[in-house]
């Protein structure tokens, strides 16, 4: 009827529909089968009319490889999955900006999603924003590090180390190496291989064409793409190896948070123990080997979000300990807490780290489990949220009702007299807080400003707390990380609950 021809097809058990042209030729229009379940992309017209005469609806569906429909409140919706082409080539997929519609997005200064699309430049909001790495005058000991981007991805390179006892054969070349910061504020997170450590006799000491890349560390767990971290190959990501350009002590102009903070991570637990496993950090924790005779040590500045295991019960179930470690101005001012062994006037400039540690019940999480953690500082208290629920609140100084001051960072801005009392002889010399070397002394607690040797300024890292004295001893996360966020405002309980629900639904 109406120029349509129907043909029975025995092999696929279907009926094909053809349209007869004015010259008698036939053009294929459709195929139908009994009990079929499918979606149509042609109009259906008025009920009772020939459905094949209805107008065709044009949809750009070339990238859809599978589709599902579901009903909510009486309305039917359709969702599609794209996978016919590479994700980094699917512009509709990589241009997804829905995260920017979330409540609280305006205060987010760092958002890293560890999945394949975040590695690529092409089509994903243009070039990636980077915070530059430090350029060294003498790269032979540490090796100058550089990030360059082509039309597809960004590459990390480091010169071959030539220090005594290090016998590297090749320079380091990793590409793709960077995960986009979707806030375009703090900068992309960079896979650096062994970083400043000698890589002799490791899988990283290979020609550029055979080296590992960030794609080798993206795994799928429970259907979720995430980054795998370990103590051997992927020992952490660097957003920068020098935070000096990110913080100047002024809340209005500093990029890193000063007055308030939110640090958030979705992570899975791998092999754990009672030592810290950092999720994100920008901190120096330089303990003194001999507290009675401190020498260039004692620095406690910055902050870190981390986890570790607590005790184990008779059933082999561990406690999970989530912690926010942070240094704030008012907490650091009391000189008596440092003891009498530091040089005169040094104590208040050293900084002191305050630990808010929440300990779960046994069996709260085990190896392989996913955990959503949010830690906040609101100017007076720190709070730990786990899986959407506030678990612990702690004052950050003796008189929190009066405010506990700004976060203290081990960076070049932190000098006397603006941010600490000057030790004797440092008046008018802008000595780094916790140091008297510019006044002819011999003590410096932190690697910061003029006291930082080449390659030893404070980094901003994911999955590792960089030990600037002993890089090989740096504590690392073992397991997977799906997402990390940093914000300049303390997140609300409603924000935390919503983020956990999103994670749980995923």
Image: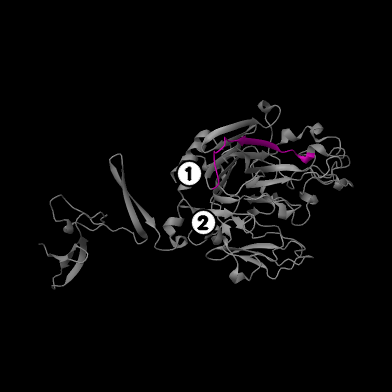
The magenta stretch is 349-367
Spot occupied by residue 93 in the image (x, y as percentages of width and height): 43, 56
Checking the image for residue 503, the label placed there is: 1
364 falls in the magenta region? yes
- Quick one: 10 or 72, which is closer to the camera? 10
439 sits left or right of 448 in the view: right
Circle 1 crowding by C-alpha within 10 Å: few under 14, some 14–19, many from 20: some
Callout 2: helix, strand or loop?
A: strand
Q: Is residue 349 above or below residue 394?
A: below
Residue drawn at (38%, 55%), measured in percent from left and top? 81
340 sits left or right of 143 in the view: right
Where on the picture, by quarter, is residue 385? Answer: top right
Spot occupied by residue 391 in the image (x, y as percentages of width and height): 57, 33
Disc 2: which residue = 219
Mark closer to the observer (1, 2): 2
Give the distance between the C-alpha atoms of the residues marked 1 and 2, in whole angstroms: 17 Å
Callout 1: helix, strand or loop?
A: helix
Residue drawn at (64%, 60%), measured in percent from left and top? 193
Q: Is residue 405 above or below residue 263?
A: above
Where on the picture, by quarter, is residue 53? Answer: bottom left
Residue drawn at (68%, 51%), measured in percent from left and top? 459
Q: Are marks 1 and 2 in contact (CB under 8 Å)?
A: no
Specify the quadrant that holds the N terminus.
bottom left
């Amino acid at each position: 009827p109406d120029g349509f021809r129907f043909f029975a097809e025995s092999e696929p058990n279907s009926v094909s529909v053809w349209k007869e042209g004015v010259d008698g030729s036939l053009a294929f229009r459709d195929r139908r089968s009994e009990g079929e379940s499918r979606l149509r992309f042609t109009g259906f017209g008025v009920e009772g009319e020939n459905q094949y005469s209805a107008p065709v609806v044009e949809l750009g569906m070339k990238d859809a490889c599978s589709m599902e429909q579901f009903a909510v409140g009486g309305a039917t919706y359709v969702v599609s999955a794209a996978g016919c082409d590479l994700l980094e080539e699917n512009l509709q997929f990589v241009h997804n900006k829905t995260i920017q519609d979330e409540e609280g997005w305006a205060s987010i200064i760092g958002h890293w999603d560890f999945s394949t699309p975040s590695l690529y430049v092409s089509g994903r909001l243009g070039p990636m924003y980077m915070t530059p790495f430090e350029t060294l005058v003498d790269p032979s000991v540490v090796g100058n590090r550089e990030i360059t981007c082509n039309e597809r991805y960004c590459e990390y390179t480091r010169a071959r180390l030539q220090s005594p006892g290090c016998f590297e054969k090749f320079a380091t070349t990793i590409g793709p190496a960077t995960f986009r910061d979707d806030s375009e504020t703090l900068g992309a997170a960079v896979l650096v291989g062994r970083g400043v450590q000698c890589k002799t006799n490791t899988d990283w000491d290979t020609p550029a064409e055979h080296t590992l890349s960030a794609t080798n560390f993206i795994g799928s767990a429970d259907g979720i793409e995430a980054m795998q971290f370990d103590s051997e190959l992927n020992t952490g990501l660097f957003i920068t190896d020098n935070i000096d350009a990110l913080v100047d002590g002024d809340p209005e102009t500093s990029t890193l948070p000063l007055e308030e903070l939110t640090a958030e991570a979705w992570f899975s637990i791998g092999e754990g123990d009672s030592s810290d496993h950092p999720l994100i950090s920008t901190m120096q924790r330089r303990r003194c080997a001999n507290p009675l005779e401190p020498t260039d040590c004692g620095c406690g500045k910055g902050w870190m979000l981390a986890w570790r295991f607590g005790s184990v019960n008779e059933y082999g179930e561990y406690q999970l300990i989530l912690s926010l470690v942070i240094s704030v101005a008012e907490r650091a001012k009391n000189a008596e807490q440092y003891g009498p062994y530091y040089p005169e006037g040094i104590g208040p400039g050293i900084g002191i780290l305050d630990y808010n540690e929440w300990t779960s019940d046994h069996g709260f999480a085990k190896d392989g489990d996913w955990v959503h953690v949010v830690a906040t500082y609101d100017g007076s208290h720190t709070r730990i949220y786990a899986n959407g629920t506030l678990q612990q609140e702690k004052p950050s100084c003796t008189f929190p009702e009066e405010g506990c001051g700004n976060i203290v960072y081990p960076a070049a801005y932190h000098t006397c007299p603006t941010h600490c009392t000057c030790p004797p002889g440092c008046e008018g010399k802008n000595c780094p807080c916790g140091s008297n070397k510019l006044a002819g002394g011999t003590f410096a607690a932190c690697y910061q400003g003029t006291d930082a040797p080449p390659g030893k300024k404070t980094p901003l890292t994911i999955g590792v707390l960089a030990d600037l004295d002993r890089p090989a001893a740096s504590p690392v996360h073992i397991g997977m990380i799906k997402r990390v966020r940093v914000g300049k405002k303390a997140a609300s309980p409603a924000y935390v609950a919503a983020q956990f629900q999103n994670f749980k639904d995923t």
